[in-house]
Amino acid sequence: MATTIDRRRFLQLAGAAGLAGAGATALSSCSSTPAASTGGSAPSVELPAYVDNGVVTPNLVGDTRHGALSGYLQYPASPKALYPEPVLQGEKVSVLTYSFDPVAPKLGDNAIWQQINQRIGAQIDIAYTPFADYPNRFATTIAGGSIPDIVTVRSPQQQMPALLRATFSDLTGRLSGDAVKKYPNLAGLPTPSWQETVFENAIWGVPVPRSLVGNVLYVRGDLIKKAGGTTTPANYAEFVETAELLTDERKARWASGDVIGFFAFVLGMNRIPGTWVVDGGTFKSAYELPEYEQALTDMRDLVKRGIFHPDAAASVNTQRNEWFLNGTSSMVLASYGGWSKFATWGAAVDGFELAGMIPPGRNGGQGSHQRSKPVDAFAAIAKQKDDSRVDRLLQVLNWLCAPFGSREYLERTYGIAGQTYTLKGTDPILNSKGTNQALVPFEYLAGSPVALYQPGEPASVRARFDYQTAALKLITPDPTSGLYSPLDSSKGAALAKPLADLSTEIFFGRQPVSAWKNAVRTWKNGGGDAIAAEYGTANGQR
């Protein structure tokens, strides 16, 4: 029987995890890329050169240049200091970003933040808001005209190219091609992530790289084994069999506690990789494909079979995660980055076995895996009266992008030995003070390529790496990556909302699947076809 987890502690951890992916609407769940893709409409600018800046050799080697993650089974015993001396001399730097985490202790009470400032040689003043509030904070900041030195920019934004030209520094001359080598940690960022910073043949920021793997269907291997199911179904029928074995309403057990987010996995079984596909050179929405209607039919079937928690439609991430950990459900959809969190939480649960379920093809063979954007956002530098200051601000970002295995990475992530973390062998383990102080959201401003690493848990690292290896084989590139559609940026979300609402109605049997075609026709006539044409035009300008 699963061990009971203290609810207050669980909710605190769940808030810190930022596992926001599982609660997306049905349509946005089909791809973690928003309907309005980022990037420039004519990305012929030379992207920054890639130079491997790793200071330690990975135990599990991924193709970092092209966005795959590498795995590390332990932290090096003597981390190399890339910058023994501060890179600046007492500069004051203002920053605006966001966070998925609780509020961190302020600078005066935060040894990790103080040490980062000392190492960089700057007083970094970070203003941040919860992620959900950031669009409003960003808009009011831009409108107010008093722009912090470094601002986290998320796409899409209306009139993005014009906004960037008016507000931020063009970094092309400093970062394009070999010029980036002046900032070696920036040169180590994956090439696909840079593409997302290009608008109208200019580089406008430093990317915050993320995994190419989208949301994962996490499963309780121990509960599935006990029920007689499989974590590797060969087709939709085998998946349904396992889901039904996991469901017993009399014992308050269901396969999953998430209806809306679960659609991403069902789309994968029907080989729908994302919102847009290219058919004969023409951009076409996945909404128009017969496989999409089949996925809607399958979701309707799963709901009818009763495999979802009765409160699933109104549940939130923390509730779904708690159901997963206490055994109420055996499957939950969440971000790939959340793997280490689930592994940590599960350590307190008797017999807990964590696995990720790869979507099979509906009728056998391979499915498609949900893809993710190669960036979370990018850090843009406000226009400066003294142009040379742009270089100094890039040095701040360069320091924050120091790779795994360096002293700088250790200090940015874990802080001060004996004060905010202790060593277990050579692995740093945050204590309660460090866990709190490390919540300063530097990671949403800048960071090195994501490292697959979990202190003292090499088996979890291997599992994540093996899952990535399998998932990347099923991920196709987003055809809108590096393209910009003004209409999609301004109206794409509003145009898609009726489809999202209808899909939910179909899931729960309140509308027939046959209603989908007319809704898609309305979407196409209302702007969907125009968006596709804009992407086609932008693609032709490459």
Image: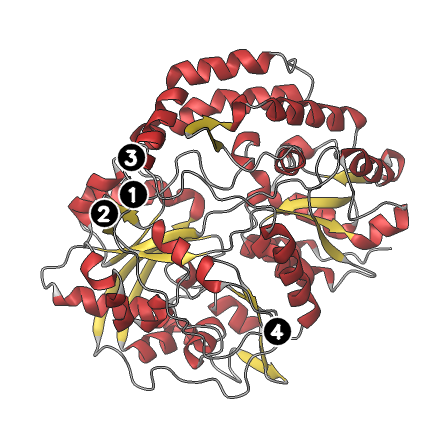
Q: Disc 2 residue type?
A: Asn
Q: Nearer the viewer, mark 4 or mark 1?
A: 1
Q: How crowded is mark 1: few (under 14 residues within 10 Å), some or many (20 or more)?
A: many
Horizontal and vertical percent position of residue 148 = 23, 56
Q: Which mark is residue 158?
A: 3
Q: Which of marks 3 and 2 is nearer the N terminus?
A: 3
Q: Are marks 2 and 1 in contact (CB under 8 Å)?
A: yes
Q: Is residue 81 left or right of residue 305?
A: left
**Residue 345 found in image quarter:** bottom right
Q: Disc 1 residue type?
A: Gly
Secondary structure, mark 4, is loop
Q: Residue 40 carries which label?
A: 1
Q: Residue furthest left?
A: 385
Q: Which of marks 3 and 2 is in front?
A: 2
Can residue 502 be seen here? The reply is yes
Quadrant containing the N terminus in the rendered view:
bottom right
Q: How far apart are marks 1 and 3 (CA)?
A: 13 Å
Q: How far apart are marks 4 and 1 (CA)?
A: 39 Å
Residue under label 4: 455
